[in-house]
Image (tube, helix red, strand yellow):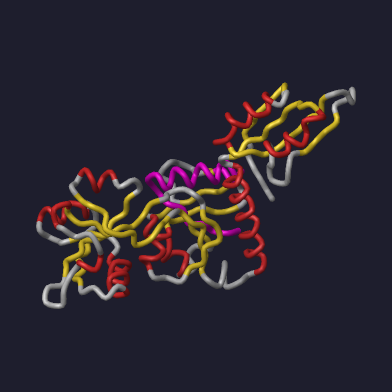
Amino acid sequence: MLRIALPNKGRLSEDTRELFNDAGLEVRASSERALTASLGGEFEAIFVRAQDIPEFVADGAADVGVTGWDLVSESERTLASHLDLGFGRCRLVVAAKDDAGITSVEQIGTTQKPARVATVFPRIARRFFAERGRPVEIVPVSGAAEIAPHLGIADVIVDLTSTGSTLRVNGLREIETVMQSSAHLVTASAGPRNGDPIRGQALDELVTALGSVIRARGQRYLMANVPRDALDAVRRVLPGLNGPTVIEIADHGRFVAVHAVVAADTIYRTISQLRALGGEGILVTRIERLVP
């Protein structure tokens, strides 16, 4: 049985539990504070801090982990990503005060006066500025890095943002993106338990299950009856995964049934186009799983 390290709190934890539940791997714990749980009776979960998961996985305490790629990069442990889970998306950025007059990384720090950089990600920040040849002094903080420039603790910060609104509210300007991040399913580079084939197969099955849920999100299954003589036009409206499935209706009359997978954000326009072609009996449903 694979042991999977999952975030124990926060939005990352909530999104992870939702994904596993949708994949049929419901979290079954003895209590809300339990440190371990069964995942649908197929896997064992351990709940730890997201920032500790790279270490747990790299050291073999867990076979698989779910955590942010920013935390994997900061850990400097060699891990393999098997799936981008699509949530927890954010950017790690360099930012400075609006009135600092800094508009590019090349303006940060000099040999005579290295810039002070406050960040929760000291390793990533140190690598980034070293690669850009900028002399800096890293000031590690545990949180609220955006206040550091206003207190004179640092000249710039390296911090996470999703929309940039928190930076703007605090009078900070984005200078450059250091990296993009999201939640990933990770293992040690050699795979679960150094390439154990049984655990390797279990990992493949887990990736397939979670991937099928991720692919289904944002997709809808559409069914409609359309005029037979409009099929060529219908195929252009419903490209689907491999084109629409066309099914004969029992009376073999003027209409045929078409089924297709379409993007959720195009449903409104797709329905309008089908109706314009004479389509009727249109039905749209959600998709739980989508395995290519």
Residue 279, image x and y in percent?
Answer: 72, 24
Quarter that holds the N terminus = bottom right
Instruction: Give left or right: position of 257 versus 289.
Output: right
Label count reads 0
Q: Quadrant of residue 223?
A: top right
- Between 277 and 147, the residue placed more toward the observer is 277
Name the outermost residue toward the bottom.
Answer: 111
Instruction: Give left or right: position of 136 versus 28.
Output: left
Instruction: Give left or right: position of 219 versus 135.
Output: right
Q: Residue at x 41, y 56 (%)?
A: 181
Residue 25, image x and y in percent?
Answer: 59, 46
Residue 165, image x and y in percent?
Answer: 28, 43
Q: Residue at x 15, y 61 (%)?
A: 154
Instruction: Residue 4: say if magenta.
Output: yes
Q: Residue at x 77, y 37 (%)?
A: 232
Residue 195, image x and y in percent?
Answer: 61, 71
Instruction: Give left or right: position of 210 versus 172.
Output: right
- Between 196 and 84, the residue placed more toward the observer is 84
Q: Is residue 45 above or below residue 277?
A: below
- Between 94 and 209, the residue placed more toward the observer is 94
Q: Residue at x 34, y 62 (%)?
A: 178
Q: Is residue 264 above or below residue 212?
A: above
Instruction: Residue 77: say if magenta.
Output: no
Name the outermost residue toward the right.
Answer: 251
Region rendered in magenta = 1-26
